């Protein structure tokens, strides 16, 4: 048994040795056993790497690109906006909420025509019965047809294919 007075502790710096560069805690922790840093959890090319909101935005963008291929210059000035819910939701009645998946505002001087697509109401209307990307496309086509003064079938012949 050692006497407390003869016990000594030598404090050394583990990074002070030859060939050890001073590394931060994060660098030491992530490469603790020499296996390298961890990669991303899901690579970008896999579908799970995008959030639901990003996927929804992609569906709206795909729909707009399809309409641009069909109509060209006539819809170049449209502005498409995605919102979570309508702004004045508190003042709406249940009858108006049930049919509100998107809205449109005609062009004014100095301001383009605006189509607003509401993400949450569309998600609730789909409920797994309809393919979500097709429902998003139908909403964009309906709002575009309203601004152009045409029927949705005239704007896009594929309108309503999810309900057939």
Image: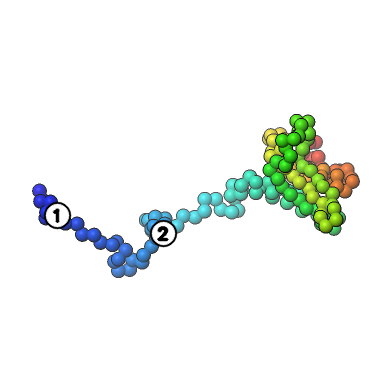
Q: Position of residue 93 (x, y in %)?
A: 76, 31
Q: In front of the other: label 1 or label 2?
A: 1
Q: Return the residue at label 2.
A: 27
**Quarter of the image holding residue 98?**
top right
**Label 1: element kind:** loop
Residue 21 lies left or right of residue 154; in this view the side is left
* Label 2: how many Cα within 10 Å (few below 14, some 14–19, many 20+): few
Residue 114 lies left or right of residue 41; in this view the side is right
In this view, which residue lies farthest toward the bottom? Answer: 18
**Visible in this render: residue 126?**
no
Residue drawn at (70%, 41%), measured in percent from left and top? Answer: 85
Q: Position of residue 157 (x, y in %)?
A: 85, 45
In this view, which residue lies farthest toward the front? Answer: 91
Q: Quadrant of the C terminus?
A: top right
**Visible in this render: residue 16?**
yes
Q: Return the residue at label 1.
A: 7
Which sits earlier in the primary sequence, circle 1 or circle 2? Answer: 1
Residue drawn at (19%, 57%), measured in percent from left and top? Answer: 9
Task: Say whether marks 1 and 2 touch (CB < 8 Å).
Answer: no
Residue drawn at (29%, 66%), measured in percent from left and top? Answer: 17
Q: Position of residue 112 (x, y in %)?
A: 81, 54
In this view, which residue lies farthest toward the top? Answer: 94
Residue drawn at (77%, 42%), measured in percent from left and top? Answer: 102
């Amino acid at each position: 048994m050692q006497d407390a007075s003869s016990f000594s502790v030598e404090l050394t710096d583990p990074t002070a040795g030859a060939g050890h560069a001073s590394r931060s805690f994060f660098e030491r922790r992530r490469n603790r056993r020499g296996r390298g840093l961890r990669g991303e959890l899901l690579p970008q090319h896999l579908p799970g790497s995008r959030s639901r909101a990003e996927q929804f935005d992609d569906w709206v963008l795909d729909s707009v690109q399809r309409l641009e291929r069909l109509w060209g210059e006539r819809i170049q000035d449209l502005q498409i906006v995605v919102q979570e819910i309508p702004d004045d939701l508190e003042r709406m009645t249940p009858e108006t909420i049930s049919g509100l998946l998107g809205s449109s505002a005609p062009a004014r001087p100095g301001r383009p025509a605006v189509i607003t697509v509401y993400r949450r109401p569309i998600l609730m209307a789909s409920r797994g019965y309809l393919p979500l990307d097709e429902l998003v496309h139908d909403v964009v086509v309906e709002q575009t047809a309203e601004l152009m003064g045409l029927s949705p079938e005239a704007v896009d012949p594929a309108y309503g294919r999810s309900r057939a």
